[in-house]
Image: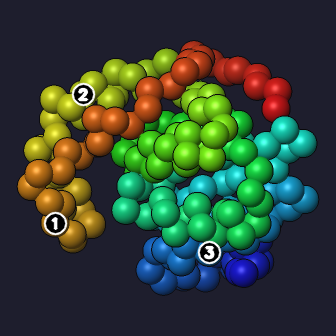
Amino acid sequence: MANLLELSAKIIDNNERWGDMRITQELSEVGDRIAMVESFSHLVVFKTDDGLAIFDTSLPMTIQPCVAAMRGWSDAPVEAIVYTHGHTDHVGGARFLVDEAKEKGRRAPQIIGHENVPARFDRYGFTSGYNKAINERQFGFKMPAEREFLNPKTPMPTMTFRDQTRVDI
């Protein structure tokens, strides 16, 4: 378990270079009932009395080790998934979490996102090849030709908001 707050302080306060992107798939507690799983896009998990609230879900190819790390910390049901925004690396693992709930006989988590997320998902559908080419150049890995940039089964938000919202869990 990394001390992420100490690492952040070194980077921010001391301007230390931290090297390459940390994709450890490891969970670190960063506060009372708050954890983060380091991945391509991190999962930030809040443990509530009713279950877990997860902010972002990483990618389809990284979500399984992320969930394994999270499940080592808590087996509580996922009550809510919050998309901080609609980029595929922040929403791509949501389908796995919805399927996990179904397999365990639990209700699907509420999925919360900005009102523009559905339009971004639609745009990804229209521009999949273009987005794949850009990301291959940017990140240096080739996506399988048969795979869409955003899995068409990625769940849409079940609740949207414009400026702000409040969810009690």
Q: Secondary structure at mark 1?
A: loop
Tell me the quarter of the picture where residue 26 sits. bottom right
Marks 1 and 3, the one that precedes in the sequence: 3
Which is more N-terminal, label 2 or label 3?
Answer: 3
Q: Which residue is at the front of the view, 94 or 132?
A: 94
Tell whether 60 sits left or right of 25.
left
Residue 83 vs residue 77: left or right?
A: left
Image marks 2 and 1: residues in contact by CB distance under 8 Å:
no
Task: Check disc 2 and give the amino acid type.
Answer: Arg
Q: Residue at x 58, y 61 (%)?
A: 67
Q: Earlier in the sequence, mark 2 or mark 1?
A: 2
**Quick one: quadrant of the C terminus?**
top right
Q: CA distance from mark 2 to mark 1?
A: 21 Å
Residue 23 location in percent, x, y?
Answer: 49, 74
Which quarter of the image is occupied by the N terminus? bottom right
Residue 113, image x and y in percent?
A: 55, 28
Looking at the rendered structure, which numbered label has been put on residue 26? Answer: 3
Per the image, the residue denoted by label 2 is 123
Residue in the image at 17% along x and 40% along y: 128
Mark 1 touches mark 3? (CB < 8 Å):
no
Q: Marks 3/2: CA distance?
A: 32 Å
Residue type beneath disc 3: Glu
Q: Residue at x 79, y 43 (%)?
A: 51
- In the figure, 118 relative to 84: above or below? above
Give the SS element for disc 3. Answer: loop
State the SS at label 2.
helix
Distance of label 1 from label 3 (alpha carbons): 25 Å
Label 3 Cα crowd, 10 Å radius (few <14 / some 14-19 / many 20+): some
Dividing the picture into quadrants, the one containing residue 66 is bottom right
Q: Which mark is residue 142?
A: 1
Q: Amino acid at mark 1?
A: Lys
